[in-house]
Image (tube, rainbow, N blue to C red):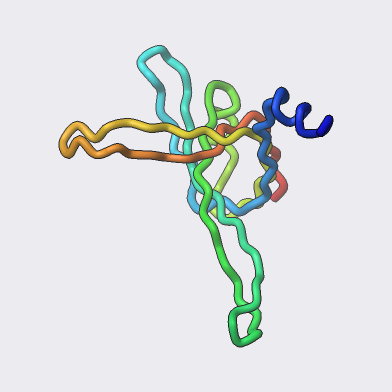
Amino acid sequence: MRGKAVFQTVKYNHVTLIGRAGADPSMRYAPDGKAHTQFNIALSSDYKDSSGEWKERTDWITLKLWDKTAERAAESIKKGNLIPIDGRLKHDQWKDSQTGEQKDFVYVAVSYWKHVE
């Protein structure tokens, strides 16, 4: 039971991914002058289907970066580049102003990335 108590008190939210950029990052500036960059990376994995045949699956993950990290990414990342990242999961929720429907969006807020190729 001791281990359970530790996990109940410590908050973990850390993501490490390596994927390929699906497009050149787009950058814009918020009214307060902060740079904001967003792009997706492709994560590929293999699996066996019900007939035992190997297949490839690609999942697309949205990344968001801010400030100098965003500016550096927008200047140097190009479509197809292999990008390792560290960050944390974020979950945004809002109500659609036209339909009143609840909307959700999950992404990785990147704190560190490295240009590999």
Coordinates of residue 11 in the picture (x, y in percent)? 68, 26
| Residue at (58, 22) in percent of width and height | 68
Can residue 108 be spotted in the picture?
yes
Q: Quadrant of residue 32?
A: top left
Can residue 75 be spotted in the picture?
no
Q: Is residue 74 left or right of residue 95?
A: right
| Residue at (83, 30) in percent of width and height | 2
Q: Is residue 77 above or below residue 90?
A: below
| Residue at (68, 49) in percent of width and height | 18
Q: Is residue 46 above or below residue 67?
A: below
Coordinates of residue 15 in the picture (x, y in percent)? 66, 39
The N terminus appears in which quarter of the rendering?
top right
Coordinates of residue 116 in the picture (x, y in percent)? 72, 47
Q: Is residue 23 above or below residue 48?
A: above
- Is 86 or 81 nearer to us in this picture? 86
Coordinates of residue 46 in the picture (x, y in percent)? 66, 70
Q: Quick one: which residue is furthest to the left in this view?
A: 98
- Is 92 or 79 nearer to us in this picture? 92
Q: Quick one: which residue is furthest to the bottom in this view?
A: 51
